[in-house]
Amino acid sequence: MTNSLFGPLHDVAEEAGYADPPERAGFFTDTSVCIGCKACEVACKEWNAIPEDGYALTGMSYDNTGALGASTWRHVAFIEQSAPREVDQGDGASRWLMASDVCKHCTHAACLDVCPTGALFRTEFATVVVQQDICNGCAYCVSACPYGVIDRREDDGRAWKCTMCYDRLGDGMEPACAKACPTDSIQYGPLDELRERARERLGDLHDQGVTEARLYGEDENDGVGGDGAFFLLLDEPETYGLPPDPVVTTRDLPAMWKWAGGAAAALAGCVAVSFLGRR
């Protein structure tokens, strides 16, 4: 094992110490067929017994949940866009972009790296799960996540996020959100198969003239080593509230420790020279 903090990994679960792990599984969310029904949100809450987080609309959108959080492990974004004026689609032409967001289960997960109690762990499926009976609520994981996914619940102080229904995977079942999606916008399966399927879908959309379609999070050479949950988007990542170029926040730790060690050695040398000079 290399214990790499950055770059592609041949087998994420094996890197985590599993001798004979199953094939890496993940989510592919095709936002081009999402209808915004929020069945995924409801299924996630029901299966994982997540408390409600309010029913009020934001006033800026038809979305009533707003964003991912400690009590929203799946969130369907509603994005309304007006057509550019130069496009002849009539007055008031607009389009809706729907996208079901979730924890990305990164190849290099900073949330896991910074946890001081071992509450977060890598599963045999290469996903990342929080153990609430060990979490001490320090929130280091919250600030370390480059996507702003993991969150601490106000009423108990502990960190919560999507587990990719770890208990269902162990029984050979797909996650509740994917099971409930009526349009197969959320697909679960072996990650390599999903990536191949996503590239075919992207090619189809480009052939249909949807040239702005793109994949997000599937590249193993990106800043987090690729995501276990990736997306087909119809616009820039920022439009969906996603960072355009996420980087694992622990990437530079070796260099930082190297510089800190050098500075400490230089300081010790200066102290020694000063002490010897007084004799």
Image: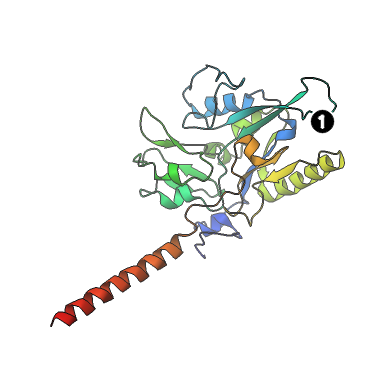
Q: Quadrant of the C terminus?
A: bottom left
Outermost residue toward the front in this view: 86
Side of 177 where 81 appears, left or right? right
Name which residue lies at 20% across and 77% down: 274
**Residue carrying label 1:** 86
Residue extending furthest toward the left:
279
**Colour scheme used in the picture?**
rainbow
The x and y percentages for residue 273 are 23, 79
User: x and y percent of residue 33 in the render?
Assistant: 74, 31
Residue 19 showing in the rendered view: no
Res. 151 in view: yes
Q: Is residue 30 above or below residue 7?
A: above
Q: Could you say where residue 236 lies in the image, as x and y percent from the top left?
A: 68, 40
The total number of labels drawn is 1
Q: Mark 1, residues whose alpha carbon is within 10 Å: few (<14), some, or many (≥20)?
A: few
Query: Which residue is at 77% across, 30% downward?
Result: 84
Quadrant of residue 178 within the rendered picture: top right
- Residue 196 x/y as whole percent: 75, 49
Residue at figure coordinates x 71%, y 48% from the top left: 195
Residue drawn at point x = 40 percent, y = 64 percent = 257
Q: Is 25 positioned to the left or the right of 109 in the image?
A: right
Q: Nearer the viewer, residue 153 or 122?
A: 153
Residue type at mark 1?
Answer: Glu
Q: Observer-nearest residue: 2 or 94?
A: 94
Circle 1 SS class: loop
